Structures are given as C-alpha cells and as structure tokens.
Image (cartoon, rainbow, N blue to C red):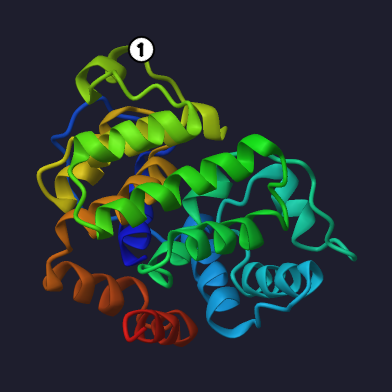
C-alpha cells in the first residue's frame, strides 16, 4: 500500500507539468500528498476497521470523513461534490480514482484472491459503481495479488489480459510518445500495470509511470503497489516519506503501522 503513497507523492508535481522522460528528481522540492493518498488511507481504514457486514453508507461515511479532514488535495469534480453529499450515493463513475486508492484490498488479503476482489468491490462501489470502474479496481488488485504469489511479469500480463480484456502488448517505450492525459480506468489502468510489469525495481516502476506524461500521480499510485509487491521498497525511502510527508499526519502513520503488521 505504501507503494501507492510514494508514487502519488513523487508524481504530484508532474500531473500538470508533464514530462516524457525517466530522468527527473525523484522527490522534487514541491512534492506533496494528493487525493490519491488520502483516499488510499480511507480505503485501508474501511477494510481494517469496518466489519464485513457493514453497509455501503458506513463505508461512504468513512471515506467522506477522511477527505473532509484533508481538504483541497486535488479531488476530481464529481468526487469533490460527493465528499459532502448527504446521503453519499454512488455516481456511476469509471474514473481512475477507482484504481489508485484500492491497493489495501490486496495487501490485507494476500492469501485469498476471492476475498481480495470482494474487498475491492466493497470499497469501489461507494462511488465508482460503473462496470469499468469496478473492473479497473479489480484488475489492479489482481495484478498486486499475483505479484505477491511471485508470478512472473509475463504470467501476470497473461492473466490480466484474459480476465479483464486489457491490451498489455505495448511496451512503456511504445506507449509514451502518443500517450496523453487520461482520467478514466480504461486509459490508465493498463498503462500503469505495464509500467510495473516492465520495471526492474520499485523506483523504476514509478519512473516508468511518470514518464508517460499523463495523470502522473495516479499512474504512479496504481503502478506503485504492484511494483512494491514485485520488488519491495527500500527502507530509507519509506522512512523519508513517513518523516517528511506524514510527520504531522498521525492518523496516516497509524494506518501504515496497522497495515504492515497484518
């Protein structure tokens, strides 16, 4: 899960200043925590503390509470309104927010794919209940889960293509030249998965994602947890994020501690 947080932070300054290269300062001076991280922590909170018999309203309220506690983090238009809706009903979204926040579902269910996918649906349907939104989240979870099973990139690629119909035939270098900013699952999830599957390290996956020149923080937040499951993350990178970007966010640090004990 922290792979999503780091990817979000590193990609934050390139969302509107897009680049087409892997050569950039990894933690730029103006990096910050965006909505991708806030929503990921909310999902972790839901899955750690809400019961399996909870209601969609309860899950929605937990998400709303987190986002209201961290306002102004770049929330998308429809979601920004939903944060204050009463009642907070799903709005049939297939935006890439479904996939960027969902990684805790895989991290908490490493031994059972069915449970991981069910958890994905529970936290996605509160807003992104369009079939493509649910599919994008599921594909992300499935890729992470397979990586935890030590499946090789080619095997993961084959399963994701067969199960979700995503075209994963292009390489990062082939995607990059013509890729443009995209905020839907169909135009973000396959590319982000490819960035992870082609990587030789966690950092390399994040550099792949940002180098596409698209929705950088979200691409990196999707690729990040897949790469984390594949490669792990250097301890010093995790500590830097906790000490520098989460220093005053006790609620977030608590979630990380709980997640990585489970």
Residue at the image position 26 percent from the left and 36 percent from the top: 195
Count of marks, rendered view: 1
Any part of residue 17 in sight: no
The N terminus sits in image quarter: bottom left
Q: Nearer the viewer, residue 98 or 51?
A: 51
Residue at the image position 26 percent from the left and 53 percent from the top: 147
27 relative to 188, above or below:
below
* Relative side of 47 to 9, left or right: right
Q: Nearer the viewer, residue 72 or 116?
A: 116
| Residue 115: percent from left, percent from top | 51, 65
| Residue 208: percent from left, percent from top | 23, 36
* Relative side of 153 to 162, left or right: left
Any part of residue 70 in sight: yes
Q: Nearer the viewer, residue 118 or 63?
A: 118
| Residue 237: percent from left, percent from top | 17, 67
* Relative side of 64 to 261, left or right: right
Q: Quadrant of residue 207?
A: top left
Q: Quadrant of residue 229?
A: bottom left
259 relative to 131, above or below:
below
For numbered disc 1, what is the local secondary structure?
A: helix
The C terminus sits in image quarter: bottom left
| Residue 105: percent from left, percent from top | 48, 64
Q: Nearer the viewer, residue 162 or 194?
A: 162
Residue sitting at the far top: 178
Residue at the image position 25 percent from the left and 25 percent from the top: 20
Residue topped by disc 1: 178
Residue neighbourhood size for the residue with mark 1, other residues' Cα within 10 Å, grouped as few (<14), some (14–19), many (≥20): few
């Amino acid at each position: 899960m922290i792979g999503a947080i780091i990817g979000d932070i590193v990609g934050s300054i390139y969302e509107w200043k897009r680049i087409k290269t892997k050569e950039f300062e990894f933690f730029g001076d103006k990096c910050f925590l965006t909505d991708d991280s806030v929503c990921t922590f909310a999902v972790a909170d839901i899955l750690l503390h809400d019961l399996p018999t909870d209601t969609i309203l309860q899950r929605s309220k937990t998400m709303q509470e987190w986002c209201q506690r961290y306002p102004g983090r770049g929330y998308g238009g429809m979601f920004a309104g939903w944060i204050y809706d009463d009642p907070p009903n799903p709005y049939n979204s297939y935006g890439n927010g479904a996939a960027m926040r969902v990684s805790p579902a895989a991290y908490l269910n490493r031994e059972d794919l069915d449970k991981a996918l069910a958890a994905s649906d529970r936290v996605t349907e509160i807003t992104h209940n369009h079939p493509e939104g649910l599919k994008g989240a599921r594909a992300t979870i499935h890729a992470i889960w397979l990586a935890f099973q030590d499946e090789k990139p080619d095997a993961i690629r084959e399963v994701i293509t067969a199960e979700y119909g995503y075209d994963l035939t292009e390489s990062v270098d082939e995607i990059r030249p013509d890729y443009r900013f995209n905020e839907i699952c169909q135009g973000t999830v396959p590319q982000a998965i490819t960035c992870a599957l082609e990587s030789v390290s966690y950092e390399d996956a994040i550099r792949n994602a940002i180098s596409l020149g698209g929705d950088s923080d979200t691409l990196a937040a999707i690729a990040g947890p897949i790469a984390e499951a594949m490669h792990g993350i250097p301890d010093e990178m995790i500590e830097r994020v906790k000490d520098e970007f989460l220093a005053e966010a006790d609620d977030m640090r608590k979630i990380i501690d709980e997640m990585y004990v489970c």
